[in-house]
Amino acid sequence: MKKKLVIFSGAGVSAESGLKTFRDSGGLWEEFRIEDVATPEAWAANPALVTEFYNLRRKQVMEAQPNDAHKLLADLESRYDITIITQNIDDLHERAGSKKVLHLHGEIMKVRSSMYPELIYPIDKWEIKIGEMCERGSQLRPHIVWFGEMVPEMDNAISIAAEADLFVVIGTSLNVYPAAGILNYVKPSAQKWLIDPGDFNLDYVINLKHIKKVASEGMKVLASELNKKL
């Protein structure tokens, strides 16, 4: 039976494919305030602006390509039972070949009804327009968990983390929720890795090794270590 390897990925993985976050400088991000484009209040006040913002994000995602970190994670599926829990809203893990991906914060390549959240639709274009409706007549909105909204997949993520034999945090800080919170549910006996070039106080985490490299380079080290365990 394959060991359960759970990956918790964040923005640092997608950054190497050219996708930036609100916290990065440069690009379209500096043109917008989080409060104006990524909250329920923003949607209520100016749905056209929010729609355009996510159209631009979607266009960037469609133009981006999976990097070595995405590909190396997908390659490990031949040897491990892998589930990826990601904070990223892009589809680069899936396009690299990963089969089981749980998106905590939603998916940019899906839209949903603004009134009936269970009505979710995949899309294959970058632009959604005001006036495009779901089958029940309400405006389509990005299938994204905005600031101030509940994270509906959080319980599933916790259950997955609790089953891990091996747990990897990659491209996200252990000091930021929900990464830090999810670690609390990983078995103490599980081997854990953090792949991130930053400096962190890791004394409180049992059985954790810090690979101080960016995602793609760190994944090469991890893949080598995991191969030795087989």
Image (cartoon, grey):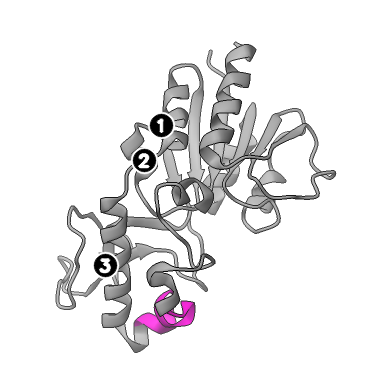
* Image location (x, y in percent) of residue 184: 72, 46
Residue found 54% across the figure and 27% down from its top: 220
Q: Residues within 10 Å of mark 1 (few under 14, many from 20)?
A: some
The residue singled out by tag 2 in the image is 66
Mark before the other along the chain sequence, 2 or 1: 2
In the displayed structure image, the side of residue 164 where residue 33 appears, left or right = left
Task: Kindly identify the amino acid type of the residue bearing the numbered disc 2.
Answer: Pro
Q: Is residue 77 above or below residue 1?
A: below
Q: CA distance from mark 1 to mark 3?
A: 26 Å
Q: Which mark is residue 71?
A: 1
Asked whether residue 121 appears in the rendered view, the answer is yes
Disc 2 to disc 3, C-alpha distance: 20 Å
Task: Give x and y (percent) for residue 8.
Answer: 56, 43
Amino acid at circle 3: Asn
Circle 2: element type: loop
Q: Residues within 10 Å of mark 2 (few under 14, many from 20)?
A: many
- The verdict on residue 63 being magenta is no
Report if the CB atoms under discs 2 and 1 are less than 8 Å apart.
yes
| Residue positioned 43% across, 74% down in the render | 38
| Amino acid at circle 1 | Lys
Q: Which mark is residue 55?
A: 3
Residue 143 sits in quarter: bottom left
Residue 156, horizontal then vertical, whole percent = 52, 46
Q: Nearer the viewer, mark 2 or mark 3?
A: 2
Which residue is depicted at the point 83% across and 45% down? 204
